[in-house]
Image: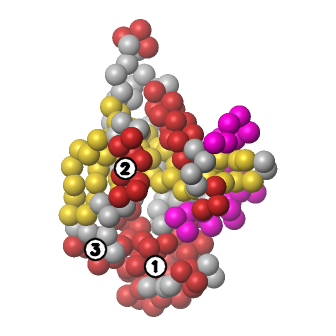
Amino acid sequence: MVGNSLKIRKLKQRDIAKARLLIEKAFSDKFCSMTSLDREQLTSSLCMEKIIDVQLHEGHRVAELDGNVVGIISVKSWKSPKTKSLDLELVKTALSEYGFLGMLNVLLGLILLDESVAKGHYYIEHIAIDESYRGKGIGNELMTFAELTALSDPDATKLTLVVARSNVRAISFYEQRGYQVDYIEKSQISKAVLGIKHWLYMSKRFVKDNNTK
């Protein structure tokens, strides 16, 4: 366990390179399927860098331990400013690296991964922990941060997330924290583009004292 030495703070410009690496490694299966690259090729792909960069927004927080960024989480609400999942530079880079059909696959993948947030909800876009620091409670600390953020909003009713049905370890982790499956979505398009056919939509509802409203 990391104890009081762990800090959770806003993502800063100096963290971008490590943030890219954490997200790329945590979701490499999706990115490999979307780009038709192998894991080694992902690290040198300029398009992959841009794919991640357009998703890094104010809702990101990093976990810092002894001066090192060891985890990242992204939380947004229905009140959050709309962020771009696509931009012209990304489209140009995808076209240059992957050709026209490859570019379309990347754009479709980003659209599939871009979840809208319903009124009253907070949504965990992603959470990633450095492989060397897993099992030390960092994921729990980041999830606690997300839950406290949502709880501090008197208008929030629940915190939501989406996870691949095949990710049994993550599902177990969320269930231990009180998240329940709302429904399962099946998508052949997602299977073709992201390599994932079934998605679990999970949530944790908040029971708030009337005095907090």
Please state which amino acid type lies under the numbered disc 2. Answer: Ser
Q: Is residue 186 left or right of residue 175?
A: left
- What is the x, y in percent for residue 31? 46, 74
Is disc 3 surrounded by few (<14), some (14 to 19) or many (20+) residues within 10 Å?
some
Q: Answer whether residue 160 is visible to the viewer in this image.
A: no
* Residue tagged 3: 191
Residue 136 highlighted magenta (yes or no) = no
209 over 158 or under it: above or below: above
**Residue located beneath label 2 in the image:** 172
Please report the bounds of the magenta region as a residue range: 1-26
Q: Nearer the viewer, residue 88 or 26?
A: 26
Q: Quadrant of the N terminus?
A: top right
Task: Please state which of the two labelled residues, at mark 1 or mark 2, is closer to the viewer.
Answer: 2
Q: Could you tell me which quadrant the C terminus lies in?
A: top left
SS state under label 3: helix
- Front residue of 131/205: it is 131
